[in-house]
Image: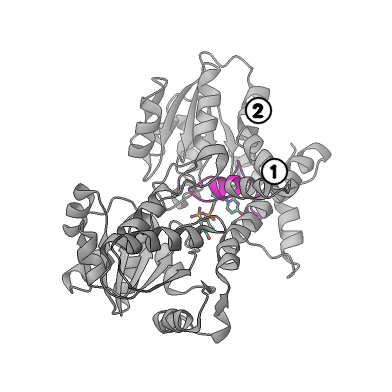
Amino acid sequence: MKISVIGTGYVGLVTGTCFAHMGNSVICVDNDIEKIEKLKKGIIPIYEPELESLVEENYRNKNLKFTVDIEEALDNSDICFISVGTPIGEGGSADLKYVLSAAESIGEKMNHHMYIVNKSTVPVGTADKVKEAIQKKLDKRKSKLTFDVISNPEFLKEGSGIEDFMKPDRVIVGADNKGAVEVMKELYTPLIDDADKFITMNIKSAEMTKYAANAMLATKISFINEMANICERVGADVNKIRIGIGSDRRIGYSFINPGCGYGGSCFPKDIKALIKTAKDNGYIPKIMESVQGLNDAQKYVLVQKVIERFDKDLYGKSFAVWGLSFKPNTDDMREASSIDIIKGLINRGAKIRAYDPKAMNNAKEIFLRENSNIEYAENKYDALLEADALILITEWREFKEPDFDIMAKYLKEKIIFDGRNQYDYEVLKKFGFEYYQIGVSI
Ligand code: UDX
């Protein structure tokens, strides 16, 4: 099928590349010339496993093209995905300026019937606004062209976006006519191994499904973090509680890993936007407000533990930090817990020596603007040199089984604060470490 994708951010690039890899003819468009030129050379602006080689292969096969010319993209496609950013706007709502400007460009430039598919995470009712924006431009041109607007939210996780796309748990399609549903069915059939995974509904329900999914996942995380905080106070071990409750199939193990808070480009932004939508419609979403509040506080739990162990005044103290990205397998620093934790420590006078396998450059951009009390280490052991303690924030695989002998030698004091509960307390005790985790009292 002939597809165009507007926006070559994380979602747009993964979507376009995967559709091309399935044998469709895909043209990705972005108004950032530099980005498009780099993509043509196979240079990917983000770190995502497998993406670079897939872009390169499909660009070489000519299944995948890149352009800054939206007219060229629309002329060469029947289905156009809008995958532009929806940053946090006024009062926490999703800012639709990029989505609506894409819609206007479509209305100005399309020359045949098109299926316009919203992939960006957008508040309920956005499809109507997109429809209106396109129609207005067509009316201005006195054009009688027709189009369909479809909602097809994405559920890609950074770090496993390609796999999530190619083997989806489900494909959600919100449409207001059978023809539009059929086109989407044809497009996604190669990825669907079970007919029940192709779920159709009206457009507003599809838009809401995306928010509900992220809200549920964020709720699970804040729930287990709350349990962790209670566990610490009553002498229980949240790691055991997790296994104890996860074994109940109704609950399940996923997304109940306790930690120092969730981050990323989706959960924080989407929860804020959902709260705003609810309030705008006269409803106070009490659970969502608690989920958000708990997560904000959870980012400070490690700082609190450091203060309790050392002192409120951390002048003269130096801490090694392992992991800066908001989760492993990505270089993305958006809303990462590391930002709040590091700032919390630096504000109390501490010095930081940080290491992350992929996110160092992005981290430097964030911290350099504000701080000179942070240094960047060559590797994970180098970060430990002369540090008063190690603080583990992101659970990259290379931190999972480190050499504890080397760590004991490098650290000034054998103390670990673990924000992701990666280690076995008994093992660390043998090496003489003091070990602080989330949700475990000592
Ligand atoms: C999320 C959704 O999972 C995805 O479906 C949606 O399309 C976009 O948002 P992503 O932001 O890439 O994906 O990351 P995810 O793996 O969901 O993790 C989000 C945050 O939650 C991370 O900071 C992670 O560390 C944290 N997390 C996750 C926990 O603290 N505990 C868990 O058990 C799981």
Residue 29 horizontal/vertical position (percent): 26, 59
Measuring 34% from the left and 68% from the top, which residue is drawn there?
80
**For residue 390, above or below residue 273:** above
Residue at the limit of the structure toward the front, as seen here: 142
Q: Residue at x 24, y 48 (%)?
A: 32
Task: Assess whether mark 2 and mark 1 are in contact (beta carbons under 8 angstroms).
Answer: no
Q: Nearer the viewer, mark 1 or mark 2?
A: 1
**Mark 1, residues whose alpha carbon is within 10 Å: few (<14), some, or many (≥20)?**
some
Residue 354: name its quadrant. top left
The overriding secondary structure of the stretch rendered in magenta is loop
Q: Amino acid at mark 1?
A: Glu
Q: Position of residue 147 (x, y in %)?
A: 38, 72
Q: Is residue 257 magenta?
A: yes
258 horizontally vs 333: left or right = right
- The answer to whether 158 is drawn above or below residue 195 in the figure is above
In the image, 141 versus 14, the foreground residue is 141
Quadrant, the N terminus: bottom left
**Lateral position of residue 330 relative to residue 46, left or right:** right
Residue nearer the viewer, 81 or 236:
81
Q: Which residue is mark 1?
A: 289
Q: Is residue 361 above or below residue 74?
A: above
| Colouring chosen for the image of the structure | one colour
Residue beneath label 2, please? 304
Q: Work out whether 330 lies above or below 75.
A: above
**Magenta span:** 255-272
Disc assigned to residue 407:
none
Residue at 58 percent of width and 47 percent of height: 273
Q: In which quadrant of the rendered image does the C terminus lie?
A: top right
